[in-house]
Image: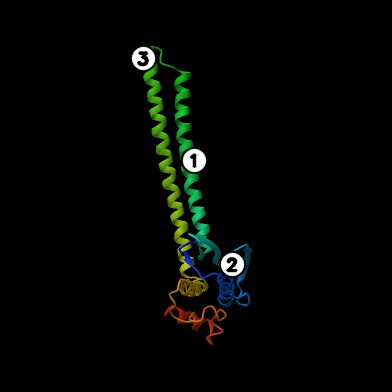
């Protein structure tokens, strides 16, 4: 998952943490309903909540947790969303680069080892002690150079393979209309959470949070809008 994340810590009124948890959970259910095909996960612990939503290639997570700083109550909001395909390609590309770099290093070390073994089997007849020392030093230098060259060559080959995978992934993501629609939903949720953060900090701006602590969380259906119209309204806010 990559490219769409946030993390905020904001002061909040005493006693507002439970209301924030309910608000975020209601907002999540409104924009990522199970009836629309989203697989929703929920994990709660003392003072915190983590919600997840997945559909097709889309995966999103948001976390709400309480905290204290300098004696005051704080609320931590964080989340991320993106393409599972992109995350898998990123892991695979990193693995193939490291694997080929290691293979190149081992190949270089094996080449130096083979050369050294041949020299030890058939040593020069007129060699003297100093030449043995110089030969050992040259062998060490050769080992370093060849291993570094092999690692560089292996890394370059791995990057070429990774680039081809990234090209295929980018084309697939660009053509995935469902993923882009889900990301628009995600951006709308982030904008509403930013308004919620500002409301908690005392900077009340925009609807639906003028009566944040007296009204339930508002989703697209409660505003009398279809989900797509609600997304367009949130994007132009």
Horizontal and vertical percent for residue 50? 58, 65
Please say if 220 is above or below 90: below
Mark 2 vs mark 3, CA separation in Å: 71 Å
Sequence-first tag of 2 and 3: 2
In the rendered image, the residue lying farthest to the bottom is 224
Question: What residue did someone put label 2 on?
Answer: 51
In the rendered image, the residue lying farthest to the front is 71
Total numbered circles: 3
Sequence-first tag of 3 and 1: 1
User: How is the protein colored in the picture?
Assistant: rainbow
Question: What residue did someone put label 1 on?
Answer: 103
Q: Which residue is drawn at 51% across and 71% down?
A: 13
Closer to viewer: mark 2 or mark 3: 2
- For residue 1, side relative to residue 33 (left or right): left
Question: What residue did someone put label 3 on?
Answer: 130
Q: Residue at x 38, y 28 (%)?
A: 141
- In front of the other: 90 or 14: 14
Horizontal and vertical percent for residue 181? 50, 75
Badge 3 crowding class, 10 Å Cα cut-off, few under 14, some 14 to 19, many 20 or more, is: few
């Amino acid at each position: 998952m990559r490219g769409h994340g946030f993390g905020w810590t904001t002061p909040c009124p005493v006693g507002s943490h439970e209301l924030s948890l309910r608000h975020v959970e209601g907002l999540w259910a409104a924009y990522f309903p199970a009836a629309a095909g989203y697989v929703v996960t929920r994990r709660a612990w003392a003072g915190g909540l983590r919600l997840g939503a997945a559909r097709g290639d889309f995966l999103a997570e948001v976390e709400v947790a309480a905290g204290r700083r300098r004696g005051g109550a704080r609320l931590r909001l964080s989340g991320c969303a993106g393409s599972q395909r992109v995350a898998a390609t990123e892991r695979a590309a990193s693995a193939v680069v490291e694997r080929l770099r290691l293979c190149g290093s081992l190949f270089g070390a094996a080449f130096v080892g083979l050369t050294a073994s041949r020299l030890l089997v058939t040593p020069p007849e007129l060699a003297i002690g100093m030449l043995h020392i110089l030969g050992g030093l040259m062998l060490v230098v050769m080992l370093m150079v060849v291993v570094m060259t092999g690692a560089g060559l292996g890394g370059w080959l791995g990057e070429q393979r990774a680039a081809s995978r990234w090209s295929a992934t980018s084309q697939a993501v660009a053509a995935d209309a469902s993923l882009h629609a889900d990301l628009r939903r995600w951006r709308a949720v982030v904008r509403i959470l930013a308004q919620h953060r500002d409301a908690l900090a005392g900077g009340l701006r925009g609807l639906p949070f003028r009566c944040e602590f007296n009204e339930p969380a508002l989703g697209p259906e409660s505003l009398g809008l279809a989900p797509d119209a609600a997304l367009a309204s949130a994007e132009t806010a």
